[in-house]
Image (cartoon, grey):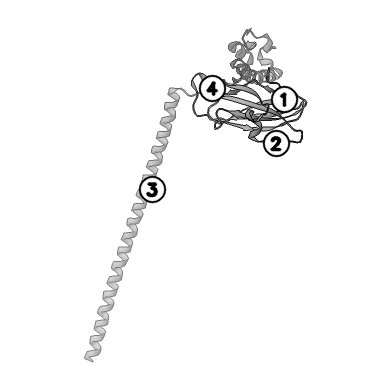
Amino acid sequence: MAASCDLLDVDPPELQFPFVLDKQISCPLRLTNRTDSTLAFKVKTTSPRKYCVRPNNGVVPPRFSCTVVVTMQAQKVVPPDLQCKDKFLVQSVIVGDGLASKDITSQMFVKEGGNVVEEVKLKVAYVMPPEPQSEIAEEHDGLERILVPMQRNVDNGRSTSELSSGSVSLRSAEEVGSPVGRIVKSEEFLKAAGPALETKTYPGPAEQSNQLSAIIAKLTEEKNSALEQNRKLRDELELVRREASKQQGSFSLVLLIAIGLLCIILGYLVNK
């Protein structure tokens, strides 16, 4: 039900904002001209820094309506018990037919100036935001997402092998009642599914220990191989050093013999 005066109908009569922290929230306000005259309106609030009103004034032709959007700025603190004392005031006055929105002035809404100004007061209320999809609906959707593919797997397996035990159908399995529909018992369902459902197995403690021992043995073997390669490289390096030392000794002996022969030749030439 709209809040009304002789000139305007204002709907809704109370501005309700689903309160959510750190989020701007808007509430539309519909203004309807009840008269055969052109009306000018102006929207005021007790908390101008908290709300944004677009447009905050305007012109409504006879028997027409317009929409004003009131936006509450993002709030950082939840008020106690979601109580709100903010209020809005919608003022309206009859104007000439040729008046445009840009020509509206504050003086038009001053009662002392002889203007007939009508007013509609609106309260502000914070309400809880709409709840998400109910848990029952979510559970029902989840079960359908699981059971439908599983039923297809069973049907496919049955078409090829008839599950190796005759014609088995999901409909013939035992079912139990549930708030979200009929749910097949998991034990009976698994029996019906047979090979269509595979269960992943994990190694036990003994098998894990064997795997660990095999890894350790492989690493030890690689370590021993690396040590053997290192030893061979050291032996080859030592052999190269010895050969170099022998060659150096032979070169020194040849050099000494050559020097001795040269000395003998020089002595012979000098004595001659």
Residue carrying label 1: 32
Task: Count every numbered label the image shows and give the total.
Answer: 4
SS under mark 3: helix
Residue denoted by label 3: 229
Residue contact at pointers 3 and 1, CB within 8 angstroms: no
Mark 4 to mark 3 CA distance (whole Å): 87 Å
* Image height of 223 relative to 182, above or below: below
Q: Secondary structure at mark 2?
A: helix
Q: Please tell me whether mark 3 or mark 1 is closer to you in this view.
A: 1
Mark 4 crowd level (few <14, some 14–19, many ≥20, 10 Å Cα) = few
Instruction: Give the foreground label among 2 and 1.
Output: 2
Judging depth in this view, the residue of 216 and 101 nearest the camera is 101
Image-based side of 76 in relation to 177, left or right: left
Query: Mark 4 and mark 1: span between their CA atoms?
Result: 26 Å
Residue 250: where, in percent of width, then height? 30, 68
Tell me which label, 3 or 1, sits earlier in the chain.
Answer: 1
Q: Which mark is residue 101?
A: 2
Q: Quadrant of the N terminus?
A: top right
Residue type, mark 1 in image: Thr
Q: CA distance from mark 3 to mark 2?
A: 95 Å
**Which sits earlier in the primary sequence, circle 4 or circle 1?**
1
- Give the answer, above or below, for where 266 lies relative to 148: below
Amino acid, disc 3: Gln
Q: Which residue is mark 4?
A: 85
Q: Residue at x 21, y 90 (%)?
A: 271
Tell me which segment is drawn in magenta: 97-103
Q: Tell me how far mark 2 sits from mark 1, CA to CA.
A: 16 Å
| Relative image position of residue 102 (x, y in whole percent) | 69, 38
Query: In the picture, residue 161 is in which quadrant?
Result: top right
